[in-house]
Structures are given as structure tokens and as C-alpha cells.
Image: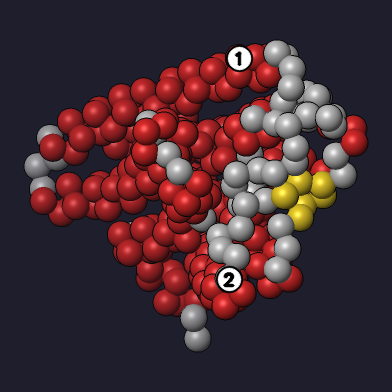
Amino acid sequence: MSNSSSIAQFLLMPFTDTRELQLLHFWLFLGIYLAALLGNGLIITTIACDQHLHTPMYFFLLNLSLLDLGYISTTVPKSMANSLRDTRNISYTGCATQLFFLFFCATAEYSLLTVMSYDRYIAICKPLHYGTLLGSRACVHMAAAAWATGFLYALLHTANTFSLPLCKGNALEQFFCEIPQILKLSCSNSYLRELGLLVVSLLVVFGCFIFILFSYVQIFRAVLRIPSEQGRHKAFSTCLPHLAVVSLFVSTGMFSHLKPRSISSPSLDLVVSVLYSVLPPVVNPLIYSMRNQELKDALWKLIP
């Protein structure tokens, strides 16, 4: 019988026990990680260097890319290091740190995606009020609120999770530290407290999703009333990338946490966790750069 004070480290679930496949996993994740660094780094650099992109929409996109870099850097490098060294270990402090930053980046990113839907709603449905409602100060405040929300939620959940007594071993059925896996190790009924916080979080997530959905219903109604085809195309080109990113982020996360237990298995859970923790930061830059002509033009100007 052990408790959280006596646990010095956790054991993460490996993708494979075969050495050759471990090295393959390392090189695959390295390629994915470098692609995420390159894509998000280019977006950040392009927006920062091009004065024409110093608008609310691109300001929020820059923040999204920063969060994507933090999101993927929280899990992938540790998984790569473990595969390269043929180990499963992560220290107690390292696990708490990883869980904090994972929850922080995910919550802040979802909050920011909600703010970005409001930005597109005002730009298309109330263009005459755009400069008033989304001035530079308002944009900074909304972005700061998204980051602060992520920080507070992560601090609350991490502190609460790691205050629980753990007595069911130290093996996690995941390649990174996450709350549901740590709760499985709890030997106290106080885990209901954390479950209560998770329920509150799900209600907030659902509320943001309804807000995003309502915003896009209004946006599409407004776009369809635009008389010129060129005007409709320009409006869609700024909205569809954001909608695609929201759909990817929400669908992968929901499937991972709400899939039926009848189809759940350790190997499937590993694959699904990659979808929501690794895929979005890699795909997001591609979605925005492919659909946004203004961003593509600025990017080509930046490359000598």
C-alpha cells in the first residue's frame, strides 16, 4: 500500500515494447514535432513582421500558434525521450508539471477559439462596429482572459488531483499524465471532488461550444445575404479555417473522453490520445495557411 507522498515517479504507457518500433516512434514523433514547430513558428513570425497583419484576427491567430507550440511541447518531447532511452519513467514533479501545462494550454486554446468566433461574428455581422468593439485594448484583454482562464483552471485541477491519496500503484494507461488516469490510482472517495470539477469544466466547454455554434449560425446567415460571389468567398475564407480548427479540437477531445467503454482498449486509447494532443497543433497552421490568401501572400514575402 502506497500513497502520493511515497510515489517518486509514475510509469507511462509505452507505444511498444519492441526496440526497433520504439526508435521508429521516436523518429515519427520527431518529424511531427518539427513540423509543428515550423508551421506555428512561421505563422508567429509572419504575423509579427508584417504590419498588414496587425489586426484582431491575426493577433488572436498568433496567440493560438503560441498555445499550439506549448500544447505539443508538453507531451511529445517526453514521449520521444522515453522511447529513445527505452524507459517509461516520469517523476512525480514532472507528471504534475506536465498535467498543469497540458490543461493550461488546452483550456486557454479553447477559450481563445471562442474569442475568435466572436471576432468573426463582429467582423461579418456587425462590420461598422468592428473597430469600436475590437480595439487593441479589447483584444489584449480578451486574449489575456483566455490565458488567465487556462492558468486558473490548470492550477485548480492540478492542485486538487495531486492532493488525492494514491494507493493503486504508479502505472498510467497513457503516454502522458492526464487527470482521468491519475484518478484511477486514487484510494479515496475524495476523487468525487475532482470529478465535480471536471463536470463543471464540461459545462463550461459545452457553453463555449453553444456560443461558437450560435456565432456561426449568424455568420452563415449574414454571408449568404452578401450579393457578390467575391464577397461571400472572402468571408468564407476567413471563417472556414477557424471553424475547421474548432471542429478538429472539439471532435478529437470529445471522442477521446466520451467514447463508449465497450470499444475502449489501451491501444485504442493511445491512438485517440495522439489525435487530440498531437494532431491539432500540427494541422492548425496548414488549415490557416491553405485557406487564407492574405496570410499566404505575407508568408511568401517573408521567405527570401
Residue sitting farthest toward the front? 1
User: In the depicted view, which residue is nearer to us: 160 or 121?
Assistant: 160
Foreground label between 1 and 2: 2
Horizontal and vertical percent position of residue 219: 26, 33
> Considering only order in the chain, which callout, 2 or 1, is on the residue closer to the N terminus?
2
Horizontal and vertical percent position of residue 117: 39, 35
- Is 118 rendered above or below residue 293? above
Circle on res. 18: 2
Per the image, label 1 sits on a secondary structure element best described as helix
In-image side of 123 versus 95 (left or right): left
Kind of residue sitting beneath label 2: Thr
In-image side of 59 versus 104 (left or right): left
* Residue 154 seen in render: no
In-image side of 139 versus 286 (left or right): right
Circle on res. 196: 1
Horizontal and vertical percent position of residue 230: 15, 54
User: In the depicted view, which residue is nearer to us: 110 or 139?
Assistant: 110
